[in-house]
Image: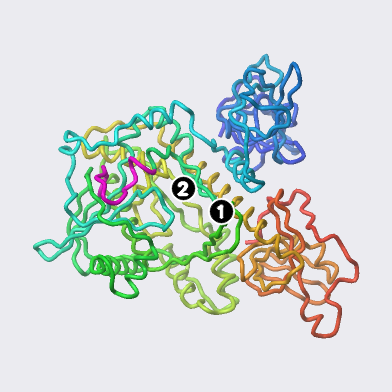
Amino acid sequence: MPVKKSSSQVEVLKGKLDISRSGMGFVIVEGQDKDIMVKPNEFGKAFHGDMVRVQVSKENGSSSRRVEGKIIDVTERKQTEFVGNVEVNKTNAFFVAGGEKPIPDFYIPMEKLNGAENGDRVVVKLSRWDKTDKKPQGEVLSVIKAEDEGDLAMKEIIIQAGFPLAFEADVLKLADSLPDTISREETKKRKDCRDILTFTIDPVDAKDFDDAISIRNLDNGNYEIGVHIADVSHFVTPDSILDKAAYARATSVYLPDRVNPMLPERISNELCSLRPNEDKYTFSVIFQINNRAEIKHKWIGRTIIHSDHRFSYDEVQEIIETREGIHFKPILLLNDLAKQFRQERFDNGAINFSSTEVKFQLDEKGKPIAVVVKESKDAHKLIEEFMLLANRTVAEYVNKIKVNKEPIPFPYRIHDTPDDEKLKPFVAFAKKFGYLFEMKDEKQVAESFNRLLKEVQGKPEQHVLEQLGIRTMAKAVYTPENIGHYGLGFENYCHFTSPIRRYPDVMVHRILQQCLDKDLKLDNKMPEKCKHCSDRERAAMEAERAGNKYKQVEYMQQFLGEEFDAVVSGVSGFGFWTETVLHKCEGLVSIRDLNTYDDFSLDDSDYSLVGARTGTRFRIGDKVKIKVVAANLTKRQLDYEWVNEKAGAAGISKTPMVKKSKKAEYKGKKTAKKAG
């Protein structure tokens, strides 16, 4: 959006700088169709990913050729810490950044080396880059003493996503100084729930337990069920250095072998973690519910709880299946209510998408030794439904509060309706398999999706339609503009239940308490904060994908030259992606290799690659046989080769007439979107 126009025939726009591998820059301005090209000598003080102000001449902007601009200011840094190597001689020291994106060398004052020696791999922080400085100046935060190549790769992924590897000393000092005692004065301000049966249900390896459930029978025949959430906002106060560190991160990052936390471990794993047999401060939503899952009463407020037991998901699942074990009656009751809530959601328009999650089993050094497919069972769904109920209840409560007839600034979690441009080709594609969509309104679209997802189970086209259906969906984001959550079928929704790992939940807690106290402090920076949290969430997700991809490549290195059954997971003009059935590891079969058999081209309408001579077709969801031919850890890239089984059955050689390089030639196309 334009931020300034002047009579000097120039326009200043604000956008995000994207630097290509070639070194050319492009500023992406929200609401503009075309990016603004920026030559390397016009970057000013900007790095890849920074929010910048770019100056464009009006004559330039009105011409038919590509718009060019000059960066005049950096408004927000994507990252201030970088990974690379130091070059040290007798009088000077410089930092040379690693990674694919060009970054200028940093000058490092000798007193800021912090023990780093020539050639060391280091984390460097940008300390200054004044107008008079030819080079950015930095200081070494730490020398990376990686255990191995994998440890270094995970650290680089975190840094490149814009997340610091560690907390600054003053942040840790403040966290360590926070008292862990339960004060009598604070207890008087809260509802005391310590005598009610309460337990947590989490993954077996979890350390930060941020939610608990309590349950007891009431004299009127109903059940009182409490959803209790760690009261992070009691310890992390607005504008404190702890708060600023948490906001900058906005989320924890979960990689296959580690967590990069939003908050120091003193808070996340000790003070706020709802560990068994300890009194803890919580923020709670307490319901009165009958056995038909009808909610008769709701209460929201700060509490104090005492968890009686820590369950893992596997333990609860066993109790549900065997109908025996510790606290089996309340768990079975909660499971029954959760199933009723779930069915009610789908009846009201929620969409029943499910996705397969893969987890790596690692050895003591972090090396992947097995791939485990994570199933969402009743134990997971039990917790999910009660967390959804609490989130929706809080959002409904806040949404009713108005100031001067206007809604108060609040970080809603919204999910827009499907984009027609994505939905229409999907509907046409689904029709080829006999699945019809009603598109008169949003509810009918949701009902059509659920009908399709139910009918497609176990059929050959299940994978392709599920994956393409998910791709038609908008991305959920945080915003004060409450348009509801289409995927969940909720008119009001927010994130309240995970404040240890998500900053929006901390904001929700604070605003919620202001509402309860009738002491509102309206935050006019809410849109900016919501966008920041959405951006950080997206960066964390990209880092998590990169971490998983690295472990996939690391795991598949042992299978070079071996053949596996696979499923086509995406297609493009330069090949198709396929995922092994056994390991769920995705790699690319390049068009270069395919064209030794036939001339293949992309058929957008059918999400497939088609051979001109033979008619051979590769479509998302198709089963194929592949050979693992390359596993590049540096690029986090797997290359597969298609095994032509039909040719082999006919007595024809399965190998192409002309032997080509097995490594896919991406040529900068790594970021190209998969068809669909």
Q: Residue at x 68, y 36 (%)?
A: 36
- Of residue 11 and residue 105, the one placed in the foreground of this image is 105
Relative to the observer, which residue lies in front, 340 or 256?
256
Q: Counting other residues with Cα less than 10 Å from the Cα at mark 2, is it few (<14), some (14-19), or many (20 or more)? A: some
Q: Compare residues 665 and 345 and report the one nearer the observer.
A: 665
Residue at figure coordinates x 36%, y 65% from the top left? 315
Q: Is residue 241 left or right of residue 228?
A: right
- Amino acid type at mark 2: Val
Label 2, on which residue?
477
Residue 487, by quadrant, is bottom left
**Residue 557: x percent and y percent?**
71, 60
Task: Give the answer, above or below, for where 254 lies relative to 121.
Answer: below
Left or right: 228 as drawn, with respect to 363: left
Residue, far top = 132
- Asked if disc 1 and disc 2 are in contact, CB closer than 8 Å, the reply is no
Kindly identify which numbered label has been placed on residue 207. Answer: none
Hey, which quadrant is residue 328 in on the image?
bottom left
Q: Quadrant of residue 50?
A: top right
Res 364 label: 1
Measuring from the top left, give residue 194's x and y in whole percent.
Answer: 19, 49
Tell me: 607 left or right of 391. right
Above or below, 658 relative to 201? below
At 75% across and 48% down in the image, what residue appears?
668
* Vertical placement of residue 349 versus 299, above or below: below
Bounds of the magenta span?
A: 269-284
Which corner quadrant holds the N terminus? top right
| In magenta stretch: residue 281 | yes
Q: Amino acid at mark 1?
A: Glu
Dot 2 lies on which element? strand
